[in-house]
Amino acid sequence: VIRFGKLYDALFAAYGPQHWWPADDTFEIVAGAVLVQRTTWRNAEAALATLQSRGLLAPEALATADTAVIEACVRRAGFYRSKARRLQGVARFLATRCGFDTLEKLPTADLRHTLLALDGIGPETADAILLYAFERPAVVVDEYLRRLVRRLLKRDAAISDTVLRTSVAAEIDDVPRLNELHALVIAHGKTVCGRRPRCGECRLSDHCRTGSKVSKA
Ligand code: SF4
């Protein structure tokens, strides 16, 4: 069993505040959440900057833009055709069917359901948008969190995303900590708990079944 509250405290002590999500407005967060799928934040950020420089980082502008222009702008983020199509789909939805003002009034479960109905918005992206764009208490389950939990418990089998989401939410239900948790888990994954974990340098090793085993080996 993982005490996610304690895990949060340990990660926060190790890495400090992460100041996420690095964006100026709500649509920039939404666009960033789509662009960062299957790539690094650096690449997503470059694509966002290009969209911004072309005046396309707004639902109305993106909704009516030439798709080829959007593709060129987001090429750096990879999967540029599907990402351009997804971005434009989200922009059209926001510009013509349901703006942020309306979405903000929805209860969290309905808002999540609405986001998930959009093309290319899966649970991870929807929860990131809920948490960072709408400041709702959502648990973002990504590969960094799945891997960390597997290693802490030294489990080979995957734990279902629903179980993970519920387990985290049972201990951490406020937006500020959920905001930090997602960013801290990524910081941890990028620092020591990457594909090849560097357990000797890890501040969580005393609480990690994988790390304990490695250090005793
Ligand atoms: S001890 Fe190793 S496996 Fe465990 S969290 Fe740290 S880096 Fe990851």
Image (cartoon, helix red, strand yellow):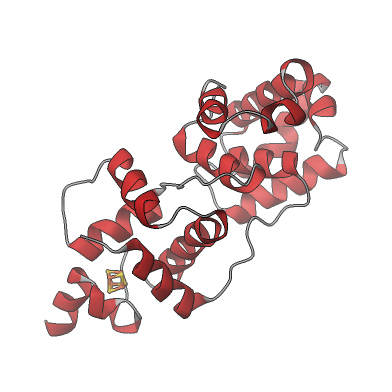
Tell whether 62 sits left or right of 198: right
Percent position (x, y) of residue 107?
57, 31
Q: Which of 88 and 172 lies nearest the eye of the viewer?
A: 172
Q: Would residue 193 be seen by someone viewing this image from the given angle?
A: no
Percent position (x, y) of residue 3?
29, 64
**Point 77% across, 46% down: residue:** 25
Q: Image quadrant of residue 114?
A: top right
Quarter of the image with the N terminus in it: bottom left
Quarter of the image with the C terminus in it: bottom left
Quadrant of the rendered image holding ligand 1: bottom left
Q: Would residue 31 be seen by someone viewing this image from the given angle?
A: yes
**Point 32% across, 41% down: residue:** 161
Residue 181 in the image: above or below residue 205: above
Percent position (x, y) of residue 67?
74, 22
Tell whether 139 sits left or right of 6: right
Q: Residue furthest top?
A: 97
Q: Image quadrant of residue 48?
A: top right
